[in-house]
Image (tube, rainbow, N blue to C red):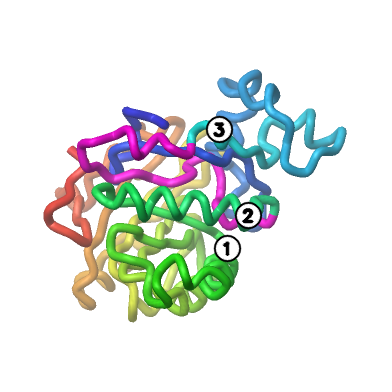
Amino acid sequence: MGQRTGIEWTHATWNPVTGCTRISSGCDNCYAATLAHRLLKDTYLSRPPVVDSPQNREDPFAVRLWPERLAQPLQWRKPRMIFVNSMSDIFHAHVPEAYTRQVFEVMLEASWHTYQVLTKRPSQALRFWERNKDLFDGGAIPPHIWVGTSVENQQAVYRVDLLRRVPAALRFISCEPLIGPVEVDLEGIHWVIVGGESGLGHRPVRPEWVTALRDRCIERGVPFFFKQWGGRTPKAGGRVLEGLTWDEFPNANYRTR
């Protein structure tokens, strides 16, 4: 678990799972895959992958489970916002449902934290809830567990319709990396994060894509968070949008700095 993180909209990261697979154009320059193949390669390759094959054993970004990390949030007594699986997707097909259930059990037990669960697979999130309603007493996922989906361009907007079907008390979308214009219905959405891409081969974000989303949020009364313009590094372009820094959250009691 990361006690410090450069991600502006959270306090810490918690990675009981690592590894993922690319499913859309927003994954092309995945920062997590880059970290896995560089700085974290030896650590990740020390653990057998969930799907044990010669190819996956050699791939540091194949899905791996880290059960020794499950209890980490319970050890943090001070409330904080926690980005769940910043290096993976808890709803990836290779993550056993029983293990995903254990992750949710920890989040329910350590309920003094706020958890940000971001997925590119909202249909799997819905199926998980349908098959594990007993975890939530048959009701909605509680307010301290936020469920979100990534929307990098118009082709990915269908994920928002799927997310709306997930009975979470708080749903959010992350338009990062924003690589194209996005027109989206914000009904049932409680927070929007926007950010440009960073790293080698980053695709520039156009200001009008960002301002269109900001204006839609203002119109619908949805908190808007602008994370970065992006560039060679995440901080290269700064965070100022038309003279302002946009750090809005769904709950005014939570701030990352």
* Comes first in the chain, label 3 or label 1: 1
Count of residue discs: 3
> Could you tell me which secondary element the residue under label 2 belongs to?
loop
Eye-nearest disc, 3 or 2:
2
Residue pointed to by mark 3: 200
Q: Could you give the CA–CA distance between mark 2 and mark 1, rounded to whole angstroms?
A: 7 Å
| 157, 257: nearer the viewer | 257
Q: Which residue is drawn at 39% across and 30% down?
A: 2
Residue type indicated by callout 3: Leu
Residue at figure coordinates x 49%, y 34% from the top left:
69
Q: Earlier in the sequence, mark 2 or mark 1?
A: 2
Look at mark 2 in the image and give the residue it sits on. 92
Q: Is residue 198 visible?
A: yes
Q: Distance between the residues labelled 3 and 1?
A: 26 Å
Residue 221 covered by magenta stretch: no
Of 21 and 12, nearer the camera is 12
Name the kind of residue labelled 1 in the image.
Answer: Arg
Can residue 157 be seen here? The reply is no
Is residue 50 shown left or right of residue 182? right
Kind of residue at disc 2: His
**Do callouts 3 and 1 mark residues in contact (Cβ within 8 Å)?**
no
Residue 50, quarter of the rendered image: top right
Is there a contact, CB below 8 Å, between mark 2 and mark 1? yes
For marks 3 and 2 on the same chain, the one whose residue lies earlier in the sequence: 2
Q: Which residue is drawn at 20% across and 52% down?
A: 246
Give the distance between the C-alpha atoms of the residues marked 3 and 2, in whole angstroms. Answer: 26 Å
Give x and y (percent) for residue 15.
49, 38
Residue 29 in percent (x, y) is at 58, 42
What is the number of the mark on residue 121? 1
Start-end of magenta stretch: 70-93
Q: What element carries label 1?
A: loop
